[in-house]
Image: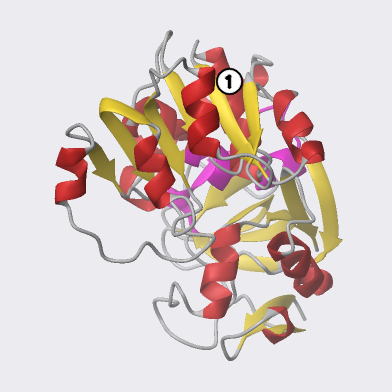
Amino acid sequence: MSKAIRIHKHGGPEVLVFEDADPGRPGPGEILVSHTAIGVNFIDVYHRTGLYPAPNGLPFTPGGEAAGVVLEVGEGVDWLSPGDRVAYVVQLGAYSEQRVVGADRVVRIPDGISDEQAAGMMLKGMTVEYLVRRTFRVKPGDTVLYHAAAGGVGLIFGQWAHHLGATVIGTAGSPEKAEFARTHGFHHVIDYRREDFVQEVARITDGRKCDVVYDSVGNDTFAGSLDCLKRLGTLVSFGQSSGPIPPFDIGILARKGSLYLTRPTLFSYNVTREELEASAAALFEVVLSGAVKIMVNQRYALKDAARAHSDLEGRKTTGTTVLVP
């Protein structure tokens, strides 16, 4: 019997239960995948705690990205065959040894990219893709600020934004994480536990501030992020690891220089098959070129998903983390 992590009630890491789970057979337009590696992301914590409720309620299997081998194809799937290496990003269901997934949601993994790399970069890498190429198109000469620079998305972001010619500023929670971020494309890294990041951004930029701030932290950084923007700058709020942003007076955007504010999600940007393929192709291209390197820094057995969540929430991880069935 195949195994999976199931959540029967919201709560801490202890609610992640490793149990039998029949993946079923693929129907029309579906495939059965045997996972070889599963990505771990902070959105998984949001689903576990109930901050982001699962669409179909409890119980559910968490996890949004994975790589594996096609075991079986359903009716109408003529572009994939058993044995093909594939990877995907969906909302839920990846913390499993095997699962059925829509064939239109997967992409083939190209030669030169390992299964662990693919599993650890699909959600994070395609998030960076839409952030730097579509939400705000980063170009040479731009100055950008990214919070949580040593996280999984951050390390990909730093390399990609650097590759695009921007001056890349990051924040991190320790000298060790700051140094790690510097090795992944960030020109300047601010230790937010010891330094005021608003003052440091002003110093680094000689008062010119930033064209765009990418903020996945939320409540703790929102006000400061606005203060780091130049006139007509853009705040991209794409996460809330410190808690949701409380209601605020929209007039503050006018008072601080007619700022732009957006709250995007990957799933809004990659709705169509064409969007998904284009996003994945751009990600694979930048990785295969060597401009962005995907390093898997933590590996846990699937049954130890609770420990992976504890370490993630305890800020004990850097970069990419995967579960191995």
Instruction: Tell me the element at label 1.
Output: helix
- The answer to whether residue 9 is magenta is no
When the figure is inspected, residue 52 is found, relative to residue 182, above or below; the finding is below
Res 28 quadrant in image:
bottom left
On the picture, is 69 further left or further right than 196?
Answer: right
Give the main secondary structure, helix, strand or loop, of the magenta stretch: helix
Nearer to the camera, 188 or 14: 188
Res 17 quadrant in image:
bottom right
Estimate the x, y position of residue 157 in percent, counting from the top left.
Answer: 56, 31
Q: How is the image coloured?
A: secondary structure
Estimate the x, y position of residue 204 in percent, counting from the top left.
Answer: 54, 19
The quarter of the rendered structure image containing the N terminus is: bottom right
Q: For the magenta stretch, what is the residue range? A: 102-127
Give the number of callouts: 1
Q: Residues within 10 Å of mark 1 (few under 14, many from 20)?
A: some
- The answer to whether residue 122 is magenta is yes
Question: Which residue is found at the position 72% from the left and 45% from the top?
Answer: 320
Estimate the x, y position of residue 277 in percent, counting from the top left.
Answer: 43, 34
The quarter of the rendered structure image containing the C terminus is: bottom right
Q: Which residue is mark 1?
A: 286
Nearer to the camera, 220 or 260: 220
Question: Which residue is found at the position 78% from the left and 63% from the top?
Answer: 311
What amino acid does circle 1 point to?
Answer: Val
Nearer to the camera, 303 or 194: 194
On the picture, is 65 further left or further right than 16?
Answer: left
On the picture, is 75 further left or further right than 3?
Answer: left
Estimate the x, y position of residue 11 in percent, counting from the top left.
Answer: 61, 85
Question: Which residue is found at the position 75% from the left and 76% from the top?
Answer: 2
Confirm whether residue 10 shows in the render: yes
Nearer to the camera, 212 or 302: 212
Question: Which residue is found at the position 37% from the left and 38% from the top?
Answer: 227
